[in-house]
Image: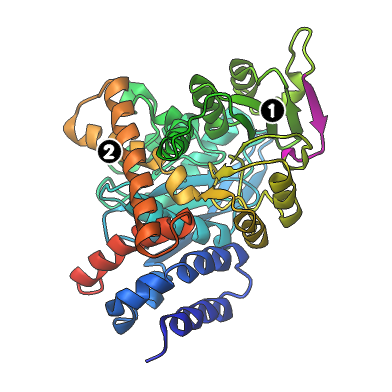
Amino acid sequence: MESSKEYIQQVIDKVKAKHPEKEEFNQAVTDVLTSLEKYLDQHPEVQDHNLLELLVEPERVIKFRVPWQDDQGNWRVNEGLRVQFNSAIGPYKGGIRFDPSVNESVIRFLAFEQIFKNSLTNLPIGGGKGGSDFNPKGKSDNEIMRFCQSFVTELQKYIGPDYDVPAGDVGVSKREISYMYGQYKRLREITPGVYTGKPLTFGGSVGRTEATGYGLVYFVDDLLKDRGDSLEGKRIVVSGSGNVAGHAIKKAQDFGGLVLACSDRGGYLYDPDGIDVDQVIAIKSNPNNTLAEYKRKGGQAKYVQGESVWDLDINYDISLPCATQNEISESQAQNIASSGVFLLAEGANMPVVKDGLEVLLDHDIIVCPGKAANAGGVAVSALEMSQNSQRLSWTFDQVDQNLQVIMQDIYQACSQAAKDYGDDKNLILGANIAGADKVFQAMLAQGLA
Ligand code: GLU
């Protein structure tokens, strides 16, 4: 039998040979598998059952045509996708992304990450993800509605409250979830638990909107506490200005952090007095607005168009990338290290390119991987499913208390696994091992099903 290292490399090579063009998917598979080496040394059952090869093969990939009519009466078409990656620990669970960058590689990578993220929440949910290359920017409300209805006319064949439960992601929020659920209801049955991230009027959970951003900051706070430190007075830079970024900024400020910058697709906003987050959220409530509209009387705030927030030349302590995958290049990782950052926590999924991650680790920067640090969103989605099954609505405090405990447990599980497998500070390794262990054990117990 080959060594664990050789076995891992063989599986990575097979995936690359089979999907040479799916870069993001290969990147995510390589990241997870390479960090499992020491775990595999102690768990020969994984290699004995060839579990790695089973793990990287999605249970199902669904691809479909989404025809829709624009306001001028033209027929348009986009591609729809749902990857049901792994159901070992529960029904497939994961968001739907509407963005022109969506393709099968991106959805496979996100669904693959979701397996371990969902496992880390300790809630019974498997991994899935879906989306379309449809661009919601600049579309009218009616166009969005017609698109969502057409998308679900096909997707409804493959989802259900105990089978596959989609939610929001980039480009999909309450409005889109509502249109999708409305169409599901017409075609199938009245069962709000088939989608999470719903409005409060028909089964949504309080605290779901805030959960990813708040959870990210709870995770960082748990880590800092463990080191006898806190967020008080920490200088922070955030990327993005959507739901995750906005709520991360809010909670970081509640904990005494000074958030100096955030960004949107057009550029970045720098405010040395601390970002006025309510203004950012108000501006961004209309997706067609940009942060150029931000105003602060007498201050030195500025919006720099066409530049990345990761090229910002200031000193700060904590970086919170909350925009999208691979937003931080290798040279930007270098810039982050030169800015004095000691901790980077991923609000987005896989926001740092592979070589960039190496730069951060070489500079001893603590990296909190997205599958652990941003798991608060999907965790509260699972709490929404529980409330829907119970026919109850919990209070904000009940949800928020649960979220805090879940994030603390995730932090503990990752740091314990990192210690157990001999690389104490490496939370990437810790998250991958802690997340994968439960999935492997469930797959084995179910006869590799
Ligand atoms: N899209 C979010 C994520 O990346 C949430 C998924 C969900 O709530 O199911 O985890």
First in sequence: mark 1 vs mark 2: 1
> Tag 1, which secondary structure?
loop
Q: What colour scheme governs how the chains and residues are painted in the rendered image of this protein?
A: rainbow
Q: Mark 2 points at which residue?
A: 385
What is the three-letter code of the residue carrying label 2?
A: Met
Q: Residue furthest bottom?
A: 1
Residue at 42% x, 54% y: name it.
114
- Looking at this view, is 88 or 92 the one in front? 88
Q: Name the residue under label 1.
A: 288
Reply above or below: 211 against 34.
above
On the image, the x and y values in percent for residue 232 come to 53, 24
Res. 54 in view: no
What is the three-letter code of the residue carrying label 1?
A: Asn
Res. 196 in view: yes
Left or right of 20, for residue 89: left
Location of residue 403 by image quarter: top left
Magenta region: 301-309
Residue 2 belongs to magenta span: no
Residue at 24% x, 33% y: name it.
388
Residue at 49% x, 48% y: name it.
370
Reply above or below: 192 against 30.
above
